[in-house]
Image: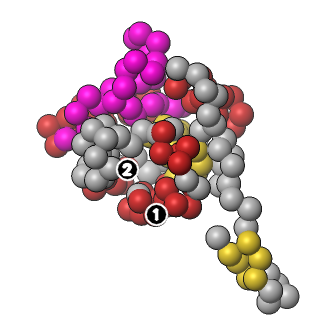
Amino acid sequence: MRFLRADGALECARPLELGEARWQPKQNCIFLDFDGVVSIGDSGGFEYLPALACMLERLPACDLVISSDWRLNGTLDEILGYVEPIASRVVGATIDLGTQYRNLELEAWVERYGIRNWAALDDREALFPKGYPRLVHTPYGLRDDQIEGIEAKLRSLLF
């Protein structure tokens, strides 16, 4: 990413590192996985992205944090290009702790930024301890027949 300095020279911005925030996050954050949530399986087609964007319009006091493995394969700017309809809501991406449990990466973000209310929107229960209370499980993506229940669970965790 490039920006124009006050003296008119072009300067390259340092890419955002995993775990860094683009701005101070709001006190309500949704940690977002892509595959199996906004994409059908591992298709990368983002078929359910419009459904997520619509749901987020009803949850204006929330920021998004990318917790998907996609964060490991490109810069945040590149990832935001794939999810343009929700890009303005993405504050950053979680760090990679190299652990089998994703909740530890989410909890590190929560602690670092002092987040009070949060939820993990993810299709893979195996990445969380059994019965993890902040997991909003989406086994089939954000299908129309599941949106109402998913949104209700998010609201119960965030507000």
Looking at the image, is 78 positioned above or below residue 55? below
User: Rounded to the nearest whole Å, what is the CA distance between mark 1 and mark 2?
Assistant: 18 Å
Part of the protein shown in magenta: 117-143
Query: Is residue 97 shown left or right of residue 133?
Result: right
Looking at the image, is 125 positioned above or below residue 2? above
Is 129 a magenta residue? yes
Looking at the image, is 13 positioned above or below residue 58? below
User: What label sits on residue 81 in the rendered view?
Assistant: 1
At which x and y percent is residue 39? 29, 45
At which x and y percent is residue 9? 80, 86
Label 2 crowding class (10 Å Cα cut-off): few <14, some 14-19, many 20+?
some
Kindly identify the residue that appears in the image at 69 percent across and 49 percent down: 17
**Residue indicated by mark 2:** 56
Of circles 1 and 2, the one toward us is 1
Give the structural element (helix, strand or loop) at label 2: helix
Amino acid type, mark 1? Gly
Query: Is residue 139 shown left or right of residue 124?
Result: left
Front-lying residue, 156 or 91: 91
At which x and y percent is residue 41? 27, 38
